[in-house]
Image (cartoon, rainbow, N blue to C red):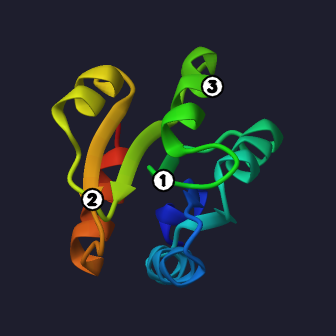
Amino acid sequence: MNENVRILVLVADDNAGIRDTTAAILRAVGYTVTEASDGQAALEEIDKKRFDVVLLDVQMPRQDGIAVVETMIDDAPPPVIMMVSAYDFDTDLRHHLNQRVFKYLKKPVPPKELIEAVGQAARL
């Protein structure tokens, strides 16, 4: 049995094509994936179950990825958080979220890089 099946991953992105592709890539290697279309939907999913890894788009409607990270600060144990964005991550954002974010990925994330990053996060 593939041990990735036990790893719960949340993919939150308002771009349906990117969200669906990311989820499909992760499911293909055995992860159990839940999708959220924006920050508020991500928080609702986080309230329902404990995720091992959370991939958050920085810019989303209703609540952006930064607000989601700040809301999850008190979660114990916290999931491993990765931020994704089509834009470069500025130094202020990295500094602000430094203690909470494991990795920053630039869109479009190549499948191999995505699989490796989630694998590293799942092993933490």
**Residue type pointed to by label 1:** Gln
Q: Is residue 41 left or right of residue 9?
A: right
Dot 3 corresponds to which residue? 71
Residue 87's place in the image compared with 42, above or below, is below
What is the number of the mark on residue 59?
A: 1
Gap in angstroms between the C-alphas marked 2 and 1: 10 Å
Residue 70's place in the image compared with 113, above or below, is above
Q: Position of residue 35 (x, y in %)?
A: 66, 65
Q: Which one is nearer the viewer's eye here, 91 or 32?
A: 91
Residue 23's place in the image compared with 62, above or below, is below
- SS for tag 2? loop
**Residue type pointed to by label 3:** Thr
Question: Which residue shows up at 60% across the image and 79% down it?
Answer: 16
Q: Is residue 108 left or right of residue 25?
A: left
On the image, which quarter does residue 114 sit in?
bottom left
Q: Which one is nearer the viewer's eye here, 31 or 105?
A: 105
Contact, CB < 8 Å: mark 2 with mark 1? yes
Mark 1 neighbour class, 10 Å CA radius: few under 14, some 14 to 19, many 20 or more:
some
- SS for tag 3? helix
First in sequence: mark 2 vs mark 3: 3
Residue 64's place in the image compared with 95, above or below, is below
Question: Which residue shows up at 53% across the image and 85% down it?
Answer: 17
Q: Position of residue 43 (x, y in %)?
A: 72, 41
Gap in angstroms between the C-alphas marked 2 and 3: 23 Å
Q: Which one is nearer the viewer's eye here, 38 or 79?
A: 38
- SS for tag 1? loop
Q: Is residue 122 visible?
A: no
Q: Which one is nearer the viewer's eye here, 65 or 101?
A: 65
Dot 2 corresponds to which residue? 87
Q: Is residue 118 left or right of residue 44?
A: left
